[in-house]
Image (tube, grey):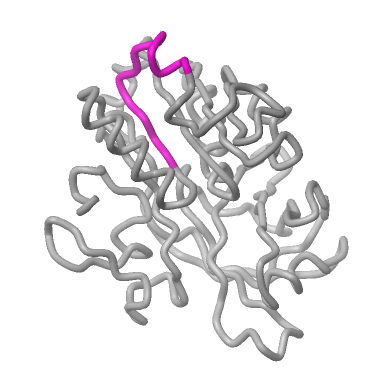
Amino acid sequence: MKKTILDLRVVSVEHIHEKYVLLKLTHENQLPDIMPGQFVEVRVDNSPKTFLRRPISISFVDKANNEIWLLVAVVGCGTRRMSELCVGDTLNCLFPLGNSFTLSGVPLSNKQAQEVRNQQILLVGGGVGVAPLLCFGHYLHLVGITPSFLLGARSSKDLLLLDEFKKYGNVFVTTEDGSAGERGFVTNHSILQHEHFVQISTCGPKPMMMAVAKYARTAGIYCEASLENMMACGLGACLCCVEKTTEGNICVCKDGPVFDINRLLW
């Protein structure tokens, strides 16, 4: 897929949490096609300590308004500067990067993928890892699939974009303190005992994804994970996002970020 570099204009800045900001971006020309799971590399201007681009998952594609949404976790100088952007500012982005989620291993662009339309798909996320799952859930909704979202957080105040997820599927929640949904981790949720899924797609903290992968293997369910390794270039040149796999060391930004868990040494 062709990559492009554009100065995107900020049309909305929503501080949805003390640690997260939702940026909505547009351009005067039609944005390129984007698949669920892909990401952007953002150049952070006016941040003297930020030398490299920052990878941010694309959390939503609003074709009607020619917008993409970026859910940014404010964790350092670069992302803090991004959280300070105002409507009308520009953000230089290299995108779309990486591969996308699939339907049982079949690329979304393949018509054969539609064969799973009437089967159950579970999207499991935690933290900022919920971002690409919203984009995937929206895509599934558009092609006639109603996904189930299983979202985990420390407490109710840390659950992100719930109203958006509810537009596209069934939402289930776990919190570590029991303040919302079921108490515990995502792999403790009762839906895993009550429902049969043909696919699980997950993104979030690595320990969470490893636990989801272990469950999927035990249950014989196809599972893919979107990795969040540190990425600087997004093109496979800097080698800082290398992951050990059954095929040797590969670059997550170029060969991922979405992987069949059977390729991972977890």
Q: Quadrant of the N terminus?
A: bottom left
Give the magenta part as a residue range.
190-202
Magenta stretch: includes residue 104: no
Residue 257: x, y in percent? 37, 55
Residue 41: x, y in percent? 54, 68
**Location of residue 223 by image quarter:** top left
Q: Is residue 254 visible?
A: yes
Q: Is residue 238 left or right of residue 66?
A: left
Q: Is residue 105 left or right of residue 141?
A: left
Residue beneath the point at 36% across and 39% down: 211
* Residue at the limit of the structure toward the bottom, as seen here: 48
**Location of residue 91 by image quarter:** bottom right
Q: Is residue 23 visible?
A: no
Q: Is residue 69 left or right of residue 114?
A: right
Residue beneath the point at 69% across and 38% down: 155
Is 141 rendered above or below residue 128?
Answer: above
Magenta stretch: includes residue 201: yes
Residue 246: x, y in percent? 13, 56
* Residue at the limit of the structure toward the left, as seen here: 247
